[in-house]
Amino acid sequence: YTYGTRSSDQGRILRSKNFAPGRKRFHGGTVSDYPLAFLVLVVFLRGLYLTVSSYLLRDAGRRSSVRYPRKDSRLCPDIVWACTTLTHKCRPPLLWGASGHIQTAYNVLVGHVFVPSPVGDRQSLSTPDGCTVTNDLYQPQHPTSSSLFFLLCPGIGNHSETFYIRSFVHYLLSNGHNVVVLNHVGTLRDVHVTGNRLFTYAKVR
């Protein structure tokens, strides 16, 4: 920096935009920036601790509360009595089961990289209004006596080639189960729309 005197023609103080008297500069910023960064770090760690502790400590081992829409109903208590899992203590895994956001982040990072490609038999059905509905049938290589049949109805706009459906089908096949996946009308690229409508999902069209 160049300093001059008031009497000379060049008697102006040339300062940088971020320079102020009494403040030392380092490579990343000024000295006063570090306490602010430390405060932000403390607040972040405190929030992270409260979030994790609320999931792992406060809710660990808590029994599920069951509420009945009608107190005079006899059907709901019978269902709760038959399904004992409704009143069991909730003990999710420490970190993996604490929040669904962790599973979502893992699926985004890893689930879209190592995606299995199960091979199924596609069947086409014609509806009375002229639409073509397709189903994909997957059969395990080594079926067992305890094999089950799973019928999967993907979410709106999804089909058997969607990543999460392929992963779930692969998991079921590896356990010896049969799987049928419904493909909504108009979602597959290689299946033409032959009718005047797309898929119908409840009241959403």
Image: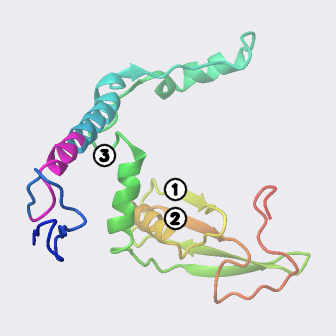
Image position, residue 84 (x, y; %): 49, 24
Q: CA distance from mark 2 to mark 1?
A: 6 Å
* Residue 37 is a magenta residue: yes
Q: Secondary structure at mark 2?
A: strand
Residue under label 2, please give it: 178
Name which residue lies at 51% across and 26% down. 86
**What crowding class fits label 1: few (fewer than 14 Cα within 10 Å), some (14-19), or many (20 or more)?**
some
Image height of 86 relative to 39, above or below: above
Image height of 65 relative to 97, above or below: above
Q: Of circles 2 and 3, which is in front?
A: 3
Q: CA distance from mark 3 to mark 1?
A: 28 Å
The amino acid type found where label 1 is placed reads: Leu
Q: Which residues are magenta?
A: 27-39
The amino acid type found where label 3 is placed reads: Trp
Residue contact at pointers 2 and 3, CB within 8 angstroms = no
Residue at the top extreme? 72
Residue at the right extreme? 129
Residue under label 1, please give it: 148
The amino acid type found where label 2 is placed reads: Asn
Which of 22/169 is in front?
A: 22
Q: CA distance from mark 2 to mark 3?
A: 28 Å
Name which residue lies at 16% across and 43% down. 35
Residue under label 3, please give it: 96
Sequence-earlier tag: 3 or 1? 3
Q: Secondary structure at mark 3?
A: loop
* Residue 50 is a magenta residue: no
Sequence-earlier tag: 2 or 3? 3
Q: Of circles 3 and 1, which is in front?
A: 3
Image position, residue 113 (x, y; %): 34, 75
**What crowding class fits label 2: few (fewer than 14 Cα within 10 Å), some (14-19), or many (20 or more)?**
many
Q: Give left or right: position of 72 versus 123.
A: right
**What crowding class fits label 3: few (fewer than 14 Cα within 10 Å), some (14-19), or many (20 or more)?**
few
